Amino acid sequence: MAVEKILVAYDKSDCAKRALDLAIDVAGNNPDAHVDVTYVVPIPMLDNAQVSDFQEILEHMIEDGKQVLSKAIEELDTDVEVDGFVMTGVSPATEIIRLVEQNDYDIVVIGNRGLNGIKEYMGSVSHKVLHGVQIPVLIAK
C-alpha cells in the first residue's frame, strides 16, 4: 500500500515534532505524497453572551496556531508537499476524527503526549483518535 495522503496532528510538544518528522519519513521519496499538518485550537463550550467576550482571545489563539505551524513546516528539510491549517473545536480529538472522515487520508500520525494539562482527566487525544478512525494511526513517542 502506497501512503500518499498523510494527516499529522500537531501542537508544540516534542512528541508532535517527532510525529511530523515521522510523517515525512513515511512519505519518503514518493513524489505523489502530501502531508497535511493540523493544529486544533481547543475552545470551551460557551453560551452566546460568552462567545462575544471570548472572540478576541480566540483570534489570538488561532494566530498563535498559525505561527506554530508555519515555524514547524519551515524547519522541515524535505521535498514532500506539506500544508498546514488551523481548526477550532471543543475537542481536538473530535475535530481530527471529523477531518479524517471528510478527507481521503491514508494514515494519521500523532504524538502520544500533547500539551493538554488536563489530559489525565479527559483522556489522551491520540487514544481517542486511534479508536475513532477507520484508517491506520501511527503514534510517535
Image: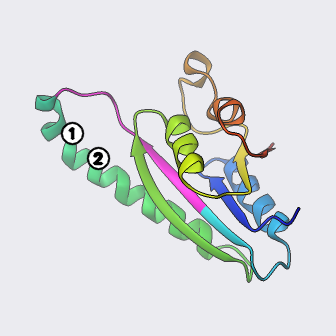
Instruction: Please tell me whether residue 59 belongs to the stretch shown in magenta.
Output: no
In this picture, is 34 found above or below 100?
A: below
Tally of numbered discs: 2
Q: Residue at x 16, y 31 (%)?
A: 50
The front one of 79 and 61 is 79
The percent position of residue 90, horizontal first and vertical second, equals 40, 33
User: Does residue 116 appear anywhere in the picture?
Assistant: yes
Which residue is identified by label 2?
58
Instruction: Please tell me whether residue 40 belongs to the stretch shown in magenta.
Output: yes
In the image: residue 67, left or right of residue 46: right
Q: Quadrant of residue 42?
A: top left
Q: Amino acid at mark 2?
A: Leu
In this picture, is 47 found above or below 13?
A: above
Q: Secondary structure at mark 2?
A: helix
User: Does residue 11 appear anywhere in the picture?
Assistant: no
The percent position of residue 86, horizontal first and vertical second, equals 45, 57
**Extent of the magenta region:** 37-47
In this picture, is 112 found above or below 25?
A: above
Q: Quadrant of the C terminus?
A: top right
On residue 54, which mark appears?
1
Q: Are marks 2 and 1 in contact (CB under 8 Å)?
A: yes
The percent position of residue 112, horizontal first and vertical second, equals 73, 38
Q: CA distance from mark 2 to mark 1?
A: 6 Å
Q: Residue at x 51, y 60 (%)?
A: 68
The percent position of residue 116, horizontal first and vertical second, equals 55, 33
In this picture, is 97 found above or below 36?
A: above
Q: Amino acid at mark 1?
A: Phe
Q: Residue at x 48, y 47 (%)?
A: 40
Q: Quadrant of residue 78?
A: bottom right
The front one of 102 and 9 is 102
Crowd band around label 1 with a 10 angstrom C-alpha radius: few (<14), some (14–19), many (20+): few
